[in-house]
Image (cartoon, rainbow, N blue to C red):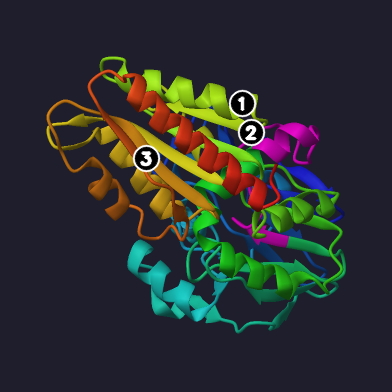
Amino acid sequence: MASRVLKSGIYSVGAIDWDRRIFDEIIPLPEGTTYNSYLIQGSEKTALLDTVDPTKIEELVTNLQELNVNIDYIISHHAEQDHSGSIQGILEIYPDADIITNPKCKEMLKDLLLIPDEKFITIEDGETLSLGDKTLKFIYTPWVHWPETMSTYLEEDKILFSCDFFGSHIAESNPFVTDEALTYRAAKRYYAEIMMPFRMFIQKNMEKLKDIPIEIVAPSHGPVYKKPELIFEAYKKWISDETKNEVVIPYVSMHGSTKEIVYYLMDILVKNGITVKPFNLTSSDVGELATSLVDASTLIIATPTVLTGPHPSAVYAAYLTNALRPKLKFVSIIGSYGWGGRTVELLKGALTNIKAEIIDPVIVKGFPKEEDFKKIDALAEEIIKKHKENGLL
């Protein structure tokens, strides 16, 4: 894909990956993605902001050669290879370029890419770099989503180059947001899968940005925002402590017993005005499950007993939830067993990061019977009560 103009002297020169369907061997990419690299031409110097995934270096090089530029600086916001992996290749073409980054990122790049120490110029939080008629201000934004990440603010044009912060995985030919609803959904999924564990750090980083006049947000994945309020307001909601009147139920059922319990419980909750989002763990998109956890108030993991513990898919759902640290208010466990086991104990032990109230689990023997359905009735009543007490219903 050819380079695209963002503003005078500012270009998007990265690559679009239409075909990539998994990221870091764990995150599904149903919409593909982009590796956004930006070129800023000042009256005296030229800076390249990040590179691209190594698989796409030819596209980056072609775009730079077509612009017929010399690169003085390579700004590295983040050491992960989808941003930094082509730095060595770019240095081979532009050997006089210096790498501008912070001390933590410098050490990571040396370890990951074996770049020699003398190629680096390190900067501190708030430091500026003049390109002549354009000034870059560097803003440390740690833990979005690695400890060394930072952003660059182009003062004259009021553009924030935010790296992974505010990103989304969408492969689009237009560099700017064209479909706000699609971008919102993709950005929420990106937040859920990558940023949600760092919610408290994001709150602090958002605070650092609040007094900076920003007219454009240019992340390292997904489209560029000409209306920054779209993504800023979304992030304010996602990182807040507010939850919605929603119950998420990841479940797996081997012989129908657990599914019977799940559907019985869902029917009661829906009839009482609660939004229920079930996910059959044998077929659901894990990214959709993660996204549902951004706003949910209650999580109920439903599983049969395999040998003496929960089904491996339920274990993974618990592990994922624990890693993502959503702002859940309530958690419970339902399911079935044949002769016994430690399902509840093991799942509770897998959710140590979740600071939610545990509502008494319901585990039934075999196919649910009348007395079991009464226990599910009681669980449903307790969930409804909790949602009402918290102003969700």
- Asked if labels 1 and 2 touch by Cβ distance under 8 angstroms, the answer is yes
Q: Say what amino acid the circle numbered 1 marks.
A: Val
- Horizontal and vertical percent position of residue 321: 42, 48
Q: Amino acid at mark 3?
A: Ile
What's the mark number on residue 274? Answer: 2
For disc 1, the marked residue is: 270
- Of 196 and 332, nearer the camera is 332
Quadrant the C terminus occupies: top right
Q: Nearer the viewer, residue 269 or 106?
A: 269
Residue 339 highlighted magenta (yes or no): no
- Position of residue 66 relative to residue 125, above or below, is above
Q: Secondary structure at mark 2?
A: loop
Q: Residue 384, located in which quarter of the rendered image?
A: top right
Q: Earlier in the sequence, mark 3 or mark 2?
A: 2
Instruction: Give 13 or 221, whichever is nearer the viewer.
Output: 221
User: Gap between marks 3 and 1, in whole Å?
Assistant: 18 Å
Q: Amino acid at mark 2?
A: Ile
Residue shown at the point (28%, 54%) measured from the top left? 349
Q: CA distance from mark 2 to mark 1?
A: 5 Å
Circle 2 Cα neighbour tier, 10 Å, few/some/many (<14 / 14–19 / ≥20): many
Kindly state the secondary structure of the residue where label 3 is placed.
strand
Q: Is 239 in front, or is 2?
A: 239
What residue span does the magenta drawing correspond to? 161-185
Q: Counting other residues with Cα less than 10 Å from the Cα at mark 3, is it few (<14), some (14-19), or many (20 or more)?
A: many
Residue picked out by circle 3: 333
Residue 267 position, x and y percent, is 55, 21
Residue 357: mark in rendering: none
Q: Position of residue 222 (x, y in %)?
A: 66, 42
Q: At x 78% / y 54%, what residue is drawn?
A: 233
